[in-house]
Each structure stands twice: as structure tokens, then as C-alpha cells.
Amino acid sequence: MVNTLIVGCGGIGTIAALNLQSGGKARVTTVLRSNYDHVKQHGFHIRSLDHGVVESFHPDTIRNTVPNLSEENIEPYRYIVCTTKNIADVPPSLSDLIRPAVTPGYSVIVLIQNGLNIEKPILDSFPQNIVLSSVSFCGSHEVGTGQIVHEDHDRASIGAFDNPNLDAQVQQKAAMDFVEIYKAGGKCSPEYQPNVGWTRWRKLLYNACLNSICAVTDLDTGRMQLADGATDNLVRPAMQEIRAAAKAYGHDLPEELVETMIRMDPITMYNPPSMQVDLRKGRYCEFETVVGEPLRAGLARGVPMPLLTALYHILRAVQWKTKERNGLVTIPEPEDHSVKR
Amino acid sequence: MVNTLIVGCGGIGTIAALNLQSGGKARVTTVLRSNYDHVKQHGFHIRSLDHGVVESFHPDTIRNTVPNLSEENIEPYRYIVCTTKNIADVPPSLSDLIRPAVTPGYSVIVLIQNGLNIEKPILDSFPQNIVLSSVSFCGSHEVGTGQIVHEDHDRASIGAFDNPNLDAQVQQKAAMDFVEIYKAGGKCSPEYQPNVGWTRWRKLLYNACLNSICAVTDLDTGRMQLADGATDNLVRPAMQEIRAAAKAYGHDLPEELVETMIRMDPITMYNPPSMQVDLRKGRYCEFETVVGEPLRAGLARGVPMPLLTALYHILRAVQWKTKERNGLVTIPEPEDHSVKR
């Protein structure tokens, strides 16, 4: 049994926990925040395309803090699976969050997170650790406290981010091992995919474009397909910009992928992607890793990206407003300008 | 006394009514909708930078329908002042709305409305009538039913749209007469400005850019000046696109106007421009005349306008959603995709 920690247990983390635990090869500890009390008592209620209805799923261990291995007598974690949102512009950083649980040179850090360049701060913080990438279209949401609805088959693409301090084969082996542990329950079909860059740029077609445009317009992916000209004038041109940026980094995303991504969610699912959900709930969204990083990457290689630039700065403005609401930004008091005399 | 009709009596229309009636040269009939009962009984309560506090303003005549001159025994209106929103993509058209009150060849139709090319459908419908343009930064809002807060001096620029069927001097005279009637009360300072195109493109710097970007980000004009990079990366580039489009039509908008417009609203006013207010209230916004028309005009003359293109299509998607909410658009029923087995 591989000792495994899952940090962040919303829609994606819970399905990961269920896959890992039901396979019987991992002992799963989950770190919960807002849903801790509820799940500790009742477990998760899950309606899943892969697993059917699971009335009450209890991870092996449920915690409300990240384990601190220097203070607690806990077996080191071999895999630390991170499924939190990656809000690069709002502290704490993921590195700071997981640091107490990481055993240098031993723990394999798995990032089941969106966006580009997300491994860089992790590798900076943990230069002797293997860091894996897992990319999936596991459309899974926590629709109420501890209530998970999972609407896309979990077909994760798993590979190692290149850590130049470590042997490449050792990193590959860790990725392949994780695939085996993850799929042991037989309910999902993850694949080892060594071309992590290609995999991540491919998903950016969805996330940098559909996800961000849904967030900005507050149209879900079904309505986006129905609304006047939205797909033709927003989604497709944005995806072409991402294709061009990916190409500048050697990743050839076939033209057909554009249509695949546009129609990935059936219209009648009316699926609000993650950033749209975040904005609806007044939460921070991960626009920096999902839009900002590919935009900066593309611009750095001279790729024109006018639409992504607009989307990025709109989302940045929206994020600023969320920061203001949360007290991270303060503004001058309002004054009455209506009557001067 | 010049018989004058005002159609639409929200923030802008009420200040126009007050200016016209208090000057003593116009007999004012107003057409109200949602605030009719309240205003009929209590009048408007106005807090105005130009007029001070007006506890109860009663227009000479208050109606809840557009007068129908073919059915009612009413003196023809010399001026028909239109201060409704101009929602070009949602019926009824302004022409259809005012048609029963228009006397062909006599009524002067005054458009105190935002946007470009708004006179075209009016001239098509009323080819023998003079149509005037009034452009103002009269920041006036109906903050509650019949409650008007007016925060910018009303310095309207008034001129005639060119009606090629009529004598130019007669059109000019009608515009100059209207200026006199409008300013007779001494509380505002409208100007006769024959270069209507320049005046309207100038205001588009504010409306196509700040107004639309505030609407899309839901940041007011104060927060727009405070938020990370929003002015530099959204507002200024959009204004440069409008300057370039205006230039393509022979209108030279000086560079300094960009900063003037950005700082027109003091930060501490935290002013939500009209389209932002509309979206907050779930209403249609006038993005077609304010963003769509200048965009189409610029593109028709080969001006690159990538940011305005993005803003236009985002607002179009948002408008589609409002149409869906109001039943103008219907969509397929949702289906449950979470559990297939």
C-alpha cells in the first residue's frame, strides 16, 4: 500500500481519491477544508459517470490540515496529489501549502491542475523531488457540501515534468507507477503520456479559450455553442491563437482538436467550466496559469495573441475586484459628487 | 411656448425635461413607463450638480403612453426628444415607438442617445423630418423610482444630422433654436456644434471603451483607474482603436482626449457607466450602437480593431443571455449526463 496524500478534495480531488482508494494499492489521506465536518460525518455522496452512484465514500483518513511530518509521527508520503485550484497571484503558494508534508528526495508531487508552467515554482521549492503532471477532462463538481457530480470519463494523461536534477528514467518510472496505482480499481483509464508539454497545451485549447470565455461572458459551454456568433468569433479565434503559441514551442495541435474541444461538452449538459463556476461564486479564478502563462509564452516567441490578451486583462480586472472584496486591495472612500452647492 | 415631447424619462430624460421646462420656452410632455405611478403622484426627486436639490419636479404633462396624434386631439409636437436606451437588436425600434407622435415635415426629432449611425433608421422612417444629435456627459441616474442623481454638468453638444432631403440651413436653425430653448433656464450650458460626426466619435472614446470595458469587467470608472493594469491594457488600447477609426472618417480626436476621458469621472465617484448599470440590472445594453457600429465602421475602412472586436463579441454573448432570460431565445432542455448506467 502506497502512502498517498491528496490536498484539495473538491470535485476533482474526490474522484482521484475514489480511484486511488478503490484500486487497493494506495492508502489515502485527504485534506479537506470547508467540507471537512460534513464529510467526516457523512462521507462524500457521488454521482459519477465512471463509478455510478456512491452513497457514502469515506477516504481512509480525513484531515483538515496538511500533515506536518516534522511534528507528527506519520509515515512519509510517497505521492502527494495536489488538486487545489492554482491561484498563482494570491498567497499562499502551493509550495508553501504542501511543504510540511513533503519529504525531500522521496515524495512524488502530482499536479492534477490546469495551466502552464505550474511545475516551475514546485521544482524551485523541491529540487530533489519528482513532479508529475496529470491532465484530465474529468468534469467533476462539488455541487453542494460533500456532493460530487462527475460527468466526464476520467482519462488522465500522466507524465513527469522534467526535473533536470534527477535521472529521467526514475522520473518516468514514478509516472508509470502512478498510472498503475490510479487505474487499479478498473473504473478509469489513465494513460502514461511522456509528452507533458503537448498534453498541457492540448488542454489549454479548452481552458485558455472555452473556460476563460465562459467565465468572461457567463455563458456555459452549451449556451456558448448556441449563442449568436460566440463560437465563431470568440472561441475559435482564441483556440487558433493557442494553436499558434503551442506550435512556437514545437507542439502541433491538429486543427480537428478545435472542433473536438468546442463539442466536448454536450450542449444539453450546460456545463459551466471551472473559472465560470469560480466567478459565479465570487471566488478567485486560476486565470494566471490558464491564460496568463500561455499568453506570455506565445508573446515571448512573437505569436500575435490579441484575443487572449483581451481575455487575460479582463480576467485580471475581475480578479482585482475579488481581491478588493476580500480585503487584499483597499480603495479610497467614495465621495458624493451630485450636489456641490 | 414650444410644444415638446420627451420619450424616456430616466436619468437623462428627467434632466432634459427639467432644463426645458424651467427655461419657460417649452411646454413639456413626458412619457414614463415603470416610474409613471410614482412620479404622477410625487414628482421626481432630483439631486443635481446643475440644479441643486429639487424636492418635487412635475413635468407639465405626464403620460404613460406615446401620444397618438391620429387618435388624440393634441397640438403637434415641434420637438420630440428621445432619451430612451437605443437597443438596436431588440424590438420595438425607436422609429416604431415614436411614430404615432411624429408629424411628418414638422416634428424635429432630437436623439439624446449614445452611439453611431443612430440617425439612419430614423431618417429612413421620417425622411421629411429634421433629426438632431445631442451628445452630453450628463452623468445622471435614476437610483430609485423617480429618484434622480445627476453628477456631471450638462454641457450638451447639439447639431443636426444631415438629412439630404432638407435644406441645410433650416436644419441648422432648428438645432440652434433647440439650444436656446434648452439653455433658457440658465442652469446648463449646451452648445451648437455643427460637426456632429466629430462630437459623436469623441463621445465614443468614452462609450465604446470605458463604458463597454466597465460593463464586461463590472468595474466602475473609479475602480478601472485603480485596478492592476486595466487602464493601460484595456482602456487606452481600445481608445486608440477608436481614434484610428475616427481618423479614417476624417475626425481627428487629439491624443490628450484619451487621458481626459479616462479621468473624466473622479475616482471617488465610483461611477458605473450606463452599460454596466444595465448588465447589473439584467437589462439589455446598447452595445450595437455603442460598440458594434464604430467597430463595423472602422473595419470597413481597414482599421485593425482587435480589442473592440473582442469586447463586441463578449457583449453580444451577454446580450444573447439576456434575450434567453426574457424568452426571445429558446434553448434545448438540459439532460443529466452524470450517470449513464
Image: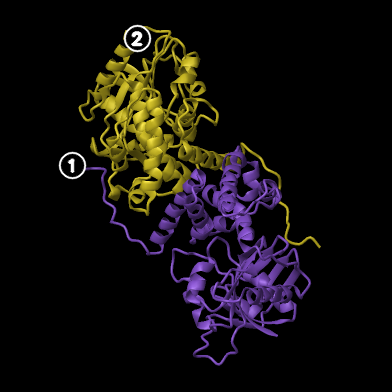
Chain colours: A purple, B yellow
Q: Amino acid at mark 1?
A: Arg
Visible residue check, residue B221:
yes
| Residue B92 on image: x %, y % | 54, 27
Residue at 38% of width from left, 60% of height from top? A324
**Disc 2 designates what residue?**
B168
Crowding at mark 1 (Cα within 10 Å: few <14, some 14-19, many 20+):
few
**Disc 1 designates what residue?**
A341
Is A282 drawn above or below residue B224 in the view shown? below
Q: CA distance from mark 1 to mark 2?
A: 41 Å
In the image: residue A68, left or right of residue A226: left
Residue at 51% of width from left, 60% of height from top? A289
Which quadrant holds residue A192?
bottom right
Which mark is nearer the camera, 1 or 2?
A: 2
Query: Can you say which quadrant of the picture contains the C terminus of chain A?
Result: top left
Secondary structure under tag 2 reads: helix
Is A269 drawn above or below residue A97 in the view shown? above
Q: What chain letter is assigned to the residue under label 2?
A: B
Crowding at mark 2 (Cα within 10 Å: few <14, some 14-19, many 20+):
some
Q: Amino acid at mark 2?
A: Ala
| Residue B2 on image: x %, y % | 31, 16
Secondary structure under tag 1 reads: loop
The dot on residue A9 is: none
